[in-house]
Image (cartoon, rainbow, N blue to C red):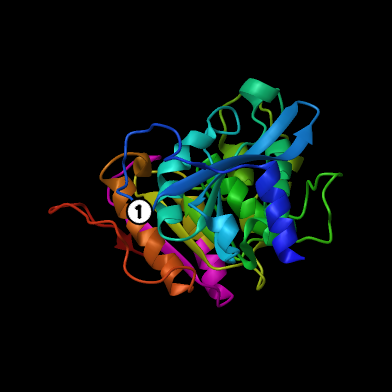
């Protein structure tokens, strides 16, 4: 039955052996040819949303259950593109993880508010878990990842109970089994109260409902967080780590000295953070072996906090 499901999916979504979008190779890939496919995971009143997959070529045919990471791009819930995390997705795919970069609704394109983005992120995780057999994913090894607003969305899939899509199968959990968060916004309530005067797409009620730090519990999955020490959002990350560790949860904090928000998007920090991400996932038995990223001599280092 499992093989039949895999063949049906293969027929519906043919794989193309390629390296994905032609981006500057910020992260050196292992010597593995990658395949890509785009799948519509949700149809909204504002349009279709896709998961853009990267995986070792022949993955569906081999029917191997692997961990899956879903990346959510940053952009303040206003702008951005799934392309932001293609380098990290390609790298993890070259290491054997099935990786996906998710579309979600943003105000510049869809004229929506952040609650819809939270809804879409939870739908994406549910879609992967619900189709684990067809795409060769281990449903108990799903990773939510993202940067800035996308990091916030990844954290929301694990922590926030509000804003489930009416079309979602609620029997499927949206909670990932691990989180990889690049300078995420973890306390939206505080940011809302600190905002400059003027209109905001977020109400206080919404801000409170989508503040991950307010819902840390013993069920929260292990997480790794990356921040530049000059990033004002780090205070929310510090708050999260303190709450998580008080409950005995695993919460790693890695800081880049004097770096601003979004530091991880450029070399050499993209390589440095990707390598640390690899080590974190290896420690959870989601990967094996050493990272294939070789850092240049004199590369900056992250500080464990």
SS label for mark 1: helix
Q: Is residue 129 visible?
A: no
Q: Position of residue 71 (x, y in %)?
A: 54, 47
Q: Which residue is mark 1?
A: 273
The residue that appears at 27% across and 41% down in the rendered structure is: 267
Quadrant assignment for the N terminus:
bottom right
Q: Is residue 239 left or right of residue 261?
A: right
**Any magenta on residue 197?**
no
**Any magenta on residue 246?**
yes
Instruction: Out of 277 and 197, give the one closest to the viewer.
Output: 277
Q: Position of residue 27 (x, y in %)?
A: 32, 46
Q: Which residues are magenta?
A: 241-262
The residue that appears at 61% across and 46% down in the rendered structure is: 153
Instruction: Out of 63 and 279, give the one closest to the viewer.
Output: 63
The residue that appears at 33% across and 55% down in the rendered structure is: 30
Instruction: Out of 52 and 117, give the one closest to the viewer.
Output: 52
């Amino acid at each position: 039955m499992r093989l039949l499901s895999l063949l049906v999916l293969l027929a519906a979504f043919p794989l193309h052996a390629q390296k994905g979008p032609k981006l500057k190779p910020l992260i050196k890939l292992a010597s593995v040819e990658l395949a890509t496919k785009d799948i519509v995971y949700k149809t909204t009143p504002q349009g279709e949303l896709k998961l853009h997959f990267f995986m070792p070529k022949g993955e569906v045919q081999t029917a191997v259950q692997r961990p899956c990471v879903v990346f959510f791009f940053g952009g303040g819930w206003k702008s951005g593109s799934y392309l932001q995390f293609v380098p990290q997705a390609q790298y993890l795919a070259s290491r054997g993880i099935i990786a996906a970069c998710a579309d979600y609704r943003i105000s510049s394109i869809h004229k929506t508010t952040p609650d819809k983005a939270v809804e879409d992120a939870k739908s994406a995780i549910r879609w992967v878990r619900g189709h684990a057999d067809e795409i060769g994913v281990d449903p108990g090894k799903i990773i939510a990842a993202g940067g800035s607003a996308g990091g916030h969305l990844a954290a929301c899939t694990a922590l926030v109970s509000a804003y489930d899509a009416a079309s979602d199968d609620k029997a499927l959990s949206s909670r990932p089994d691990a989180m990889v968060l690049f300078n995420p916004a973890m306390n939206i309530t505080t940011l809302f109260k600190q905002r400059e005067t003027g209109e905001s797409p977020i109400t206080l009620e919404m801000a409170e409902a989508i503040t991950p730090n307010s819902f840390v519990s013993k069920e929260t999955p292990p997480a790794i967080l990356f921040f530049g020490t000059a990033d004002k959002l780090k205070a929310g990350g510090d708050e999260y780590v303190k709450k998580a560790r008080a409950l005995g949860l695993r919460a790693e904090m890695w800081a880049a000295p004097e770096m601003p928000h979004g530091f991880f998007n450029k070399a050499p920090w993209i390589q440095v953070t990707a390598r640390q991400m690899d080590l974190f996932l290896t420690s959870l038995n989601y990967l094996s072996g050493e990272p294939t990223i070789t850092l240049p001599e004199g590369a900056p280092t992250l500080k464990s906090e």
